Image: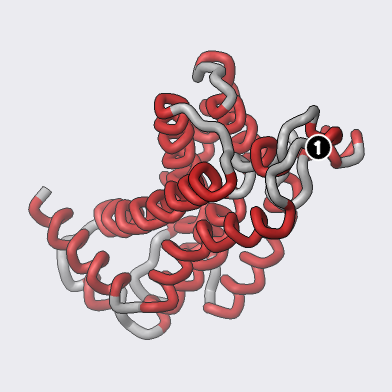
Amino acid sequence: MRVFVKVLKTTALRTLREPANVVFMIAFAPTFMLIMGLIFGNGPKKEFGGEGFLDANVTAFPGIVIAIAAVIILPVDLVTQRETGVLRRFRATPLRPAVYMSADLTVRVALSLLSIACLYAVAIVGFGVGADAVRAVNVLLATALGLCAFMALGYLLAGLLPSQGAAQGIGNILVYPLIFLSGAAVPLSQLPEGVAAVARFSPLTQLTFLTKGLWEGEGWIQHWGSAASLIAMGVLCGVLAARCFRWER
Protein backbone atom coordinates (compact mmCIF):
# COMPACT_ATOMS: atom_id res chain seq x y z
CA MET A 1 0.00 0.00 0.00
CA ARG A 2 2.87 2.36 0.81
CA VAL A 3 4.36 1.80 -2.64
CA PHE A 4 0.98 2.41 -4.26
CA VAL A 5 0.55 5.72 -2.39
CA LYS A 6 4.03 6.90 -3.45
CA VAL A 7 3.39 6.03 -7.08
CA LEU A 8 -0.05 7.66 -6.85
CA LYS A 9 1.49 10.92 -5.60
CA THR A 10 4.18 10.84 -8.29
CA THR A 11 1.64 10.17 -11.03
CA ALA A 12 -0.72 12.87 -9.78
CA LEU A 13 2.05 15.48 -9.64
CA ARG A 14 3.29 14.56 -13.11
CA THR A 15 -0.24 14.80 -14.53
CA LEU A 16 -0.94 18.15 -12.88
CA ARG A 17 2.31 19.55 -14.31
CA GLU A 18 0.92 19.00 -17.83
CA PRO A 19 -1.53 21.91 -18.40
CA ALA A 20 -2.97 20.42 -21.59
CA ASN A 21 -3.91 17.19 -19.81
CA VAL A 22 -5.52 19.02 -16.90
CA VAL A 23 -7.45 21.40 -19.15
CA PHE A 24 -8.86 18.59 -21.25
CA MET A 25 -9.57 16.22 -18.38
CA ILE A 26 -11.42 18.84 -16.33
CA ALA A 27 -12.62 21.61 -18.65
CA PHE A 28 -13.57 19.81 -21.85
CA ALA A 29 -16.73 18.07 -20.62
CA PRO A 30 -18.48 21.07 -18.98
CA THR A 31 -17.43 23.30 -21.88
CA PHE A 32 -18.88 20.83 -24.36
CA MET A 33 -22.16 20.75 -22.42
CA LEU A 34 -22.27 24.54 -22.34
CA ILE A 35 -21.80 24.72 -26.11
CA MET A 36 -24.44 22.05 -26.78
CA GLY A 37 -26.88 23.83 -24.49
CA LEU A 38 -26.33 27.19 -26.13
CA ILE A 39 -26.76 25.70 -29.61
CA PHE A 40 -29.73 23.39 -29.07
CA GLY A 41 -31.30 24.64 -25.86
CA ASN A 42 -33.55 22.38 -23.82
CA GLY A 43 -37.02 23.26 -24.99
CA PRO A 44 -39.53 20.41 -25.57
CA LYS A 45 -39.17 18.68 -28.94
CA LYS A 46 -41.52 16.22 -30.64
CA GLU A 47 -38.68 13.99 -31.84
CA PHE A 48 -37.67 13.40 -28.22
CA GLY A 49 -41.16 12.62 -26.99
CA GLY A 50 -41.72 16.10 -25.63
CA GLU A 51 -38.42 16.19 -23.77
CA GLY A 52 -35.72 18.75 -24.38
CA PHE A 53 -32.61 17.89 -26.38
CA LEU A 54 -30.42 17.88 -23.27
CA ASP A 55 -32.97 16.00 -21.15
CA ALA A 56 -33.02 13.22 -23.76
CA ASN A 57 -29.29 13.05 -24.42
CA VAL A 58 -27.40 14.33 -21.37
CA THR A 59 -26.20 10.87 -20.31
CA ALA A 60 -24.76 10.14 -23.76
CA PHE A 61 -22.38 13.12 -23.83
CA PRO A 62 -19.91 11.77 -21.22
CA GLY A 63 -19.20 8.96 -23.69
CA ILE A 64 -17.26 11.43 -25.83
CA VAL A 65 -15.04 12.35 -22.87
CA ILE A 66 -14.52 8.71 -21.91
CA ALA A 67 -13.69 7.56 -25.43
CA ILE A 68 -11.16 10.32 -26.13
CA ALA A 69 -9.53 10.15 -22.68
CA ALA A 70 -9.21 6.35 -22.68
CA VAL A 71 -8.62 5.43 -26.31
CA ILE A 72 -6.49 8.36 -27.50
CA ILE A 73 -5.01 10.41 -24.65
CA LEU A 74 -4.07 7.51 -22.35
CA PRO A 75 -2.24 5.34 -24.94
CA VAL A 76 -0.48 8.33 -26.49
CA ASP A 77 0.64 9.55 -23.06
CA LEU A 78 1.96 6.16 -21.90
CA VAL A 79 3.69 5.39 -25.21
CA THR A 80 5.31 8.84 -25.09
CA GLN A 81 6.52 8.13 -21.55
CA ARG A 82 7.95 4.83 -22.76
CA GLU A 83 9.67 6.42 -25.77
CA THR A 84 11.20 9.26 -23.72
CA GLY A 85 12.50 6.90 -21.03
CA VAL A 86 10.20 8.06 -18.22
CA LEU A 87 8.89 4.56 -17.60
CA ARG A 88 12.37 3.03 -17.82
CA ARG A 89 13.23 4.57 -14.46
CA PHE A 90 10.70 2.30 -12.78
CA ARG A 91 12.22 -0.84 -14.29
CA ALA A 92 15.12 -0.82 -11.82
CA THR A 93 12.62 -0.96 -8.94
CA PRO A 94 10.51 -3.94 -7.81
CA LEU A 95 7.40 -2.03 -8.90
CA ARG A 96 4.95 -4.26 -10.73
CA PRO A 97 3.09 -3.02 -13.82
CA ALA A 98 -0.27 -3.66 -12.13
CA VAL A 99 0.62 -1.30 -9.26
CA TYR A 100 1.76 1.44 -11.63
CA MET A 101 -1.35 1.09 -13.80
CA SER A 102 -3.60 1.10 -10.73
CA ALA A 103 -2.09 4.36 -9.49
CA ASP A 104 -2.21 5.93 -12.95
CA LEU A 105 -5.81 4.73 -13.38
CA THR A 106 -6.85 6.27 -10.05
CA VAL A 107 -5.59 9.70 -11.10
CA ARG A 108 -7.15 9.57 -14.56
CA VAL A 109 -10.51 8.31 -13.32
CA ALA A 110 -10.64 10.93 -10.56
CA LEU A 111 -9.97 13.81 -12.96
CA SER A 112 -12.32 12.48 -15.65
CA LEU A 113 -15.09 11.84 -13.12
CA LEU A 114 -14.71 15.38 -11.77
CA SER A 115 -15.02 16.71 -15.31
CA ILE A 116 -18.14 14.65 -16.01
CA ALA A 117 -19.71 15.72 -12.71
CA CYS A 118 -19.15 19.33 -13.82
CA LEU A 119 -20.82 18.46 -17.14
CA TYR A 120 -23.94 17.31 -15.31
CA ALA A 121 -23.81 20.40 -13.08
CA VAL A 122 -23.81 22.68 -16.13
CA ALA A 123 -26.76 20.76 -17.61
CA ILE A 124 -28.78 20.91 -14.38
CA VAL A 125 -27.96 24.42 -13.20
CA GLY A 126 -27.50 26.11 -16.56
CA PHE A 127 -30.20 24.50 -18.67
CA GLY A 128 -32.75 23.09 -16.25
CA VAL A 129 -32.16 19.41 -16.93
CA GLY A 130 -34.21 17.44 -14.40
CA ALA A 131 -32.19 15.42 -11.90
CA ASP A 132 -32.56 13.43 -8.70
CA ALA A 133 -29.70 13.18 -6.17
CA VAL A 134 -29.86 9.39 -5.78
CA ARG A 135 -30.13 8.85 -9.52
CA ALA A 136 -27.21 11.22 -10.14
CA VAL A 137 -25.02 9.26 -7.70
CA ASN A 138 -25.92 6.00 -9.46
CA VAL A 139 -25.09 7.55 -12.83
CA LEU A 140 -21.69 8.71 -11.57
CA LEU A 141 -20.98 5.21 -10.20
CA ALA A 142 -21.87 3.74 -13.59
CA THR A 143 -19.69 6.36 -15.26
CA ALA A 144 -16.77 5.36 -13.02
CA LEU A 145 -17.33 1.74 -14.06
CA GLY A 146 -17.28 2.79 -17.71
CA LEU A 147 -14.13 4.85 -17.20
CA CYS A 148 -12.31 1.90 -15.63
CA ALA A 149 -13.42 -0.47 -18.41
CA PHE A 150 -12.36 1.83 -21.25
CA MET A 151 -9.12 2.86 -19.60
CA ALA A 152 -8.23 -0.81 -19.26
CA LEU A 153 -8.59 -0.91 -23.05
CA GLY A 154 -6.35 2.14 -23.24
CA TYR A 155 -3.61 0.44 -21.19
CA LEU A 156 -3.85 -2.59 -23.45
CA LEU A 157 -3.42 -0.41 -26.54
CA ALA A 158 -0.45 1.32 -24.91
CA GLY A 159 1.21 -2.04 -24.33
CA LEU A 160 0.59 -3.30 -27.86
CA LEU A 161 1.32 -0.21 -29.96
CA PRO A 162 4.97 0.49 -30.85
CA SER A 163 5.01 4.28 -31.18
CA GLN A 164 3.26 7.53 -30.38
CA GLY A 165 2.19 7.88 -34.02
CA ALA A 166 0.66 4.41 -34.00
CA ALA A 167 -1.18 5.16 -30.74
CA GLN A 168 -2.57 8.39 -32.21
CA GLY A 169 -3.62 6.74 -35.47
CA ILE A 170 -5.22 3.62 -34.01
CA GLY A 171 -6.87 5.68 -31.31
CA ASN A 172 -8.55 7.91 -33.89
CA ILE A 173 -9.65 4.91 -35.95
CA LEU A 174 -11.32 3.36 -32.90
CA VAL A 175 -12.75 6.41 -31.19
CA TYR A 176 -14.98 7.86 -33.89
CA PRO A 177 -17.07 4.74 -34.51
CA LEU A 178 -17.40 4.33 -30.74
CA ILE A 179 -18.68 7.89 -30.37
CA PHE A 180 -21.04 7.87 -33.35
CA LEU A 181 -22.56 4.51 -32.42
CA SER A 182 -23.02 5.38 -28.74
CA GLY A 183 -25.62 8.12 -29.14
CA ALA A 184 -23.15 10.79 -28.06
CA ALA A 185 -22.93 12.41 -31.50
CA VAL A 186 -26.26 11.31 -33.01
CA PRO A 187 -29.13 10.25 -30.70
CA LEU A 188 -29.68 6.49 -30.90
CA SER A 189 -33.33 7.10 -31.70
CA GLN A 190 -32.28 8.95 -34.86
CA LEU A 191 -29.99 6.19 -36.21
CA PRO A 192 -31.18 3.94 -39.05
CA GLU A 193 -32.62 0.67 -37.76
CA GLY A 194 -29.75 -1.46 -39.08
CA VAL A 195 -27.08 0.84 -37.67
CA ALA A 196 -28.87 0.98 -34.31
CA ALA A 197 -28.92 -2.83 -34.20
CA VAL A 198 -25.14 -2.95 -34.72
CA ALA A 199 -24.61 -0.12 -32.24
CA ARG A 200 -26.04 -2.24 -29.42
CA PHE A 201 -22.87 -4.35 -29.49
CA SER A 202 -20.62 -1.35 -28.80
CA PRO A 203 -19.41 -1.18 -25.18
CA LEU A 204 -19.84 2.60 -25.20
CA THR A 205 -23.47 2.13 -26.25
CA GLN A 206 -23.92 -0.29 -23.36
CA LEU A 207 -22.58 2.38 -21.03
CA THR A 208 -25.07 4.85 -22.50
CA PHE A 209 -27.93 2.37 -21.96
CA LEU A 210 -26.83 1.91 -18.34
CA THR A 211 -26.44 5.59 -17.47
CA LYS A 212 -29.64 6.62 -19.27
CA GLY A 213 -31.63 3.93 -17.47
CA LEU A 214 -30.26 4.93 -14.07
CA TRP A 215 -30.88 8.62 -14.83
CA GLU A 216 -34.51 7.81 -15.59
CA GLY A 217 -34.94 5.99 -12.29
CA GLU A 218 -34.48 2.38 -13.38
CA GLY A 219 -32.38 0.04 -11.26
CA TRP A 220 -29.06 -1.70 -11.77
CA ILE A 221 -30.86 -5.04 -11.95
CA GLN A 222 -32.78 -3.89 -15.02
CA HIS A 223 -29.47 -3.12 -16.74
CA TRP A 224 -27.35 -5.94 -15.35
CA GLY A 225 -26.35 -7.01 -18.87
CA SER A 226 -24.82 -3.62 -19.67
CA ALA A 227 -23.02 -3.50 -16.31
CA ALA A 228 -21.77 -7.08 -16.71
CA SER A 229 -20.44 -6.39 -20.21
CA LEU A 230 -18.46 -3.39 -18.94
CA ILE A 231 -17.07 -5.37 -16.00
CA ALA A 232 -16.07 -8.23 -18.33
CA MET A 233 -14.41 -5.78 -20.73
CA GLY A 234 -12.50 -4.11 -17.90
CA VAL A 235 -11.28 -7.37 -16.38
CA LEU A 236 -10.26 -8.90 -19.72
CA CYS A 237 -8.47 -5.80 -20.99
CA GLY A 238 -6.88 -5.19 -17.58
CA VAL A 239 -5.42 -8.70 -17.37
CA LEU A 240 -4.11 -8.49 -20.94
CA ALA A 241 -2.75 -4.99 -20.35
CA ALA A 242 -0.76 -6.16 -17.31
CA ARG A 243 0.77 -8.92 -19.43
CA CYS A 244 1.57 -6.62 -22.38
CA PHE A 245 2.84 -3.67 -20.34
CA ARG A 246 6.38 -2.55 -21.24
CA TRP A 247 8.66 -0.19 -19.32
CA GLU A 248 10.69 0.49 -22.47
CA ARG A 249 10.71 -0.33 -26.19
Check the image and name the residue furthest to the bottom.
Answer: 84
- Determine the residue positioned at 40% across, 32% down: 137
Relative image position of residue 235 (x, y in whole percent): 44, 38
In the picture shown, does residue 161 fall above or below 71?
below
**Residue 141, visible in the rendered structure:** yes
Relative image position of residue 109 (x, y in whole percent): 38, 51
In the picture shown, does residue 245 fall above or below 197?
below
Check the image and name the residue furthest to the left.
Answer: 2
**Residue 224, visible in the rendered structure:** no
Disc 1 packing (10 Å; few <14; some 14–19; many ≥20): few
- Determine the residue positioned at 50% across, 19% down: 220
Relative image position of residue 116 (x, y in whole percent): 47, 50
* Quadrant including the C terminus: bottom left
Which quarter of the figure has residue 197? top right
Q: How many marks?
A: 1
- Determine the residue positioned at 32% across, 70% down: 15
Residue under label 1, please give it. Answer: 45
- Determine the residue positioned at 51% across, 31% down: 131
Q: Amino acid at mark 1?
A: Lys
In the rendered view, how is the structure colored? secondary structure
Does residue 130 appear to the left or right of 148 in the view shown? right
Which quarter of the figure has residue 43? top right
Depth check: 165 or 108 in front?
108
Does residue 60 appear to the left or right of 116 in the view shown? right
Which quarter of the figure has residue 144? top left
Does residue 138 appear to the left or right of 59 in the view shown? left
Relative image position of residue 113 (x, y in whole percent): 41, 49
Depth check: 232 or 62 in front?
62
